[in-house]
Image (cartoon, grey):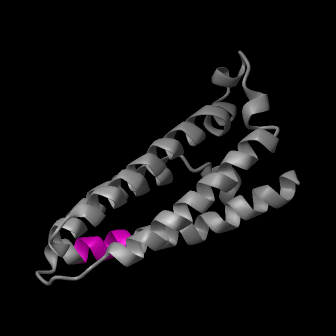
Amino acid sequence: MYETIKSLHSYFAWAALIVLAVVFLLAVLATFGGREQSVKKPALFALMAIHIQFLLGLVLYFVSPFGFSNISGDTMKDAMSRLLAVEHPLTNIIAVILITIGYSKAKRKLSESESGKTIMWFYGIGLVLLLSRIPWASWLG
């Protein structure tokens, strides 16, 4: 089960990050492009992808030997253990919360430019947070 969830979490991460990056770029274009372009529907797809990825990660956190069961006094001494057991999950939870708040705020905005600006900021910060705590060494290797 661990290997299956790990593979799903790793491969779906690419799709979720690509969708999030595309929505961020669409929001930048909507904000600075000078035309009223709605990004609410693509933002909803990105929100769903990030939430699915979060659920996969949550399951993985509890079945993985590097997640919850790895938390001990020595976890904070080893950089990779700390990244997998503490930094990656907490930072990504914050990113998911920001993306969710961004979508909720954007769908209440009356103008498409204000909606795009809200999505641009919240999704952009969420994307940076997600990219900052990916375990690149084990993910790409």
Q: For the N terminus, which image quadrant?
A: bottom right
Residue at image coords 74%, 19%? 72
Is residue 101 among the parts visible in the rendering? Answer: yes
Residue at image coords 84%, 60%? 4
Residue 62 in the image, given as x and y percentages of width and height: 76, 40
Residue 73 left/right relative to 134: right
Q: Is residue 4 above or below residue 23?
A: above
Residue 24 left/right relative to 51: left
Bounds of the magenta segment: 23-29
Residue 82 left/right relative to 71: left
- Examine the structure image and report whether residue 25 is included in the region drawn in magenta: yes
| Occupied quadrant, residue 33 | bottom left
Residue 9 in the image, given as x and y percentages of width and height: 69, 59
- Examine the structure image and report whether residue 85 is included in the region drawn in magenta: no
Residue 27 in the image, given as x and y percentages of width and height: 28, 71
| Occupied quadrant, residue 109 | bottom left
Residue 19 in the image, given as x and y percentages of width and height: 48, 73
Residue at image coords 65%, 21%? 77
Q: For the C terminus, which image quadrant?
A: bottom right
Is residue 120 among the parts visible in the rendering? Answer: no
Number of labels in the image equals 0
